Image (cartoon, helix red, strand yellow):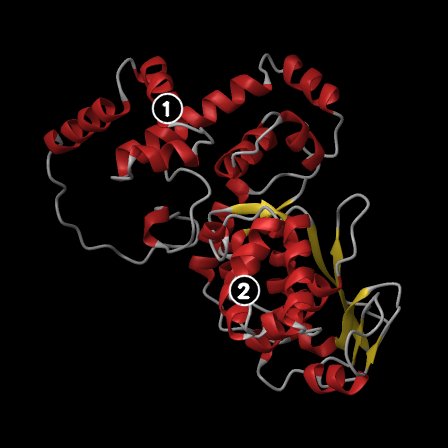
Amino acid sequence: MSFVRGTSLQGFLELVRELGADPEPLLALSHIPIGAVGDQDDFVDYRSVITVLEAAATVTGTPDFGRQLALRQGLDILGPVGIAARTAASVAAAFAAIDQYMSVYSPALSATIDPQPTARHARFDWRLDVPRPIAHRQAAELALGVSLRVFRLLTGPDFTPAVVHFRHEPLTTADSYTEYFGCPVRFAMPDTGFRFPRAVLAQPLAADGAVHDVVRDYLNTIAVPADSQTAEPVRLLIRRMLPTGGLTLDLVAQQLALHPRTLQRQLEVQDTSFAALVDEVRREEADRYLRTTDMPLGQLAGLLGYSEQSVLSRSSRRWFGTSASAHRRATAKIKSRSPPRRPATRIRRSSASRPRHRECAWPTGRPRR
């Protein structure tokens, strides 16, 4: 199972309703909680997203559903990855950041730029990186529609690809595709993506180096290193998958392209286990939320992947020697006894000085230190 953030369905509910259908049965049949739709902090199975997009197109009689949904999405669906792109120094740097950190949005997806230095046109490729992918025509058209909007956001509204490629056959008339993308569209091609003038990559952006550096620092703490064989990528995946309620060793192993027994052996070499890492991450997350939020305990239990609040209560006594409520009260008393901070006038920090995460607004995927 490969996951994608809930923002992949941003605008889905509204579009389906505008087209005269009820989105809730479609989501239920695809096993997608309605609360996850559009939620940056929630993950859903990408195959379920593919299924619900195809179902919505059929039920509403809208063969261009994916393209229509793309008009309601943009760079913001990528969360902190989008911030890294928007604050980069150039278009090339923006897409390099998207490529590097795409796994934060979804390990199932790949979006890459090939500058093709000897050619007139650079190449943008979108790919679904899952074993035995199911038919995903609506998802592919949604992806290229959003990609076009991202290019126009970064480079200006006049950006137009030279040509667009789809692996599948056309779902509507060829003219409708040409009108949408503003260029020729070819079907039954070996790739999904488009070609565009290579000079676009050198176009400078209104960069914000300080914010860009901070966001990349943050992304480095939650992005899964592709070539790492340590326990850290397992911890990062656990942290990201806990709220889904479907966290298992098999799922984490699949995301790391390892056999579950191989992953178990690697963790044993490092004197730990999958169960131990899950417990450690849950403890860290519980402590962070209890210290820094007033979140109801039932909601916190769900974020930790527990089916019942009573399980959180038992775990809290094991972790902290007391109940979750008592731990929250105790940490609040400690903070209230702390001497007040002396007001200070801050000088702008250099990029080498890392501001606290709370000074920037992006969805959390890891405790703020």
- The circle drawn on residue 312 is 1
In the rendered image, the vertical position of residue 99 relative to residue 365, given as above or below: below
| Residues at marks 1 and 2, CA–CA distance in whole angstroms | 33 Å
- The residue drawn where x is 62% and y is 87% is 158
Residue 190, position as x, y percentages in the image: 89, 63
Q: In this view, does 228 lie to the left or right of 135?
A: left
Q: Which amino acid does label 2 sit on?
A: Phe
Identify the image quadrant of residue 334.
top left
Q: How many marks?
A: 2
Can you give x and y, in whole percent of width and height, for residue 19 in the image?
A: 56, 74
N-terminal of the pair, mark 1 or mark 2, is 2
- Left or right: 129 in relation to 75: right
Residue at 12 percent of width and 33 percent of height: 336
Kindly report which numbered mark, 1 or 2, lies closer to the viewer in this rendering.
2
Quadrant position of the C terminus in the picture? top left
Q: In this view, does 110 lie to the left or right of 284?
A: right
Q: In this view, does 231 lie to the left or right of 351?
A: right
In the structure shown, which secondary structural element does the residue marked by tag 1 occupy? helix
The answer to whether residue 169 is seen in the rendering is yes
Quadrant in the picture for residue 282: top left
Q: What residue type is labelled 1?
A: Leu
Q: Where is residue 101 in the image (x, y as percent from the top left)?
A: 60, 50
Pinpoint residue 304: horizontal percent, then vertical percent.
44, 31
Residue 167 marker: none
Name the residue at 68% across, 54% down. 51
Q: Mark 2 points at which residue?
A: 12
